[in-house]
Image (tube, rainbow, N blue to C red):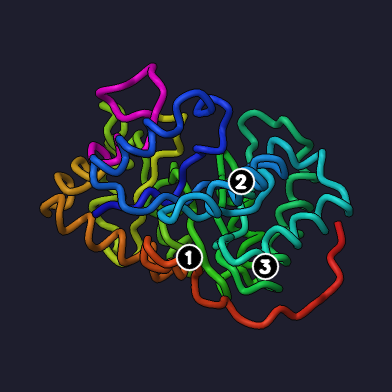
Amino acid sequence: MLTDTHAHLNHERFRSDLAGVVERARQAGVERIINVGYDLPSSREALQLARTHDAMWATCGVHPHDAAGLGPRGLEEARQLAREPRVVAIGETGLDFFRDLSPRDVQARVFRALIGLALELNLPLVIHVRDAHEEALRIVEGEGAGRVGGVFHCFSGDGAIAQRCLAAGFHIGVDGPVTYPKSGELREVVARLPLDRLLLETDCPYLPPQSRRGKRNEPSLLPEVAGRVAEVRGMTIEAVAEATTANAVRLFALAPPNERERPATGEVRGQTLSL
């Protein structure tokens, strides 16, 4: 049974057929889905999905694209959302210097603030990085984010960057691009990763695997990602599914799908957040 550790069923592109998407995922063997917040409204929507579906969990975060819109009141709302039992991580957050939709200094400030929130609530981080690995790792290392760990989602770095992510205490998330013909370097990284640090994701509705390029992605397509990972690692898809699901359960403290609450993540220290 597979776990999609980074989905966006909270996205508007799933509003018209969510029930069908969920059923197709179940039939494809996707046992658990973590819906990732990318701004406050989508974080609220992810939490609502988690409250409604036993096999879903939520994260609370602000994507670097939207960092400029997060002020002190928004950060406090994120803090309250993140304390909900069905929220299992802070993110996605990070740096995106490819599109630069928020000023870089603002991205960094919000990234640090959300790392602080993760440390306060003892929750792992879901980190988005594009064209900014050096800068993101400097922040992660400087803020001590390894105390909670998390995942560098949709990993796009090279082997040296992967080693630094691992050394910082993080997992590596692998998505549809591992199936693309031009992603040879990514497959080399995936082949060498410690199995206990590997997570599978779709990032749906984005980044569909090769067989569905140009179409909407969804969790039911995760087996194609798992199959490519199994191929490059010389494993069976069943072994990859078992290992990556165990990693997800351990990192995000996921209860079995028929249980409603995750274990407590630790004491909340009640510090004052600032931007």
* Image point (42%, 34%), residue name: 19
Q: Position of residue 75 (x, y in %)?
A: 81, 55
**Magenta residues?**
208-225
- Report the amino acid beneath label 1: Arg
Element class at badge 3: helix
The answer to which quarter of the image holds residue 138 is bottom right
Mark 2 sits on what residue? 37
Q: Position of residue 209 (x, y in %)?
A: 31, 30
108 shown above or below 117: above
Element class at badge 1: loop
84 shown above or below 74: below
The answer to which quarter of the image holds residue 129 is top right
- Report the amino acid beneath label 2: Gly
Gap between marks 3 and 1 measured at Cα: 36 Å
Gap between marks 1 and 2 measured at Cα: 20 Å
Mark 3 sits on what residue? 142
For the residue carrying disc 1, how many other residues have a C-alpha within 10 Å: few (<14), some (14-19), or many (20+)?
Answer: some
Q: Any mark on residue 260, and which? A: 1
Element class at badge 2: loop
* Image point (48%, 69%), residue name: 169
Query: Is residue 94 found left or right of 222 in the rendered image?
Result: right
- Report the amino acid beneath label 3: Gly
* Image point (22%, 61%), residue name: 242
Is 219 inside the magenta-drawn segment? yes
58 shown above or below 169: above
Query: Is residue 191 found left or right of 40 in the rendered image?
Result: left
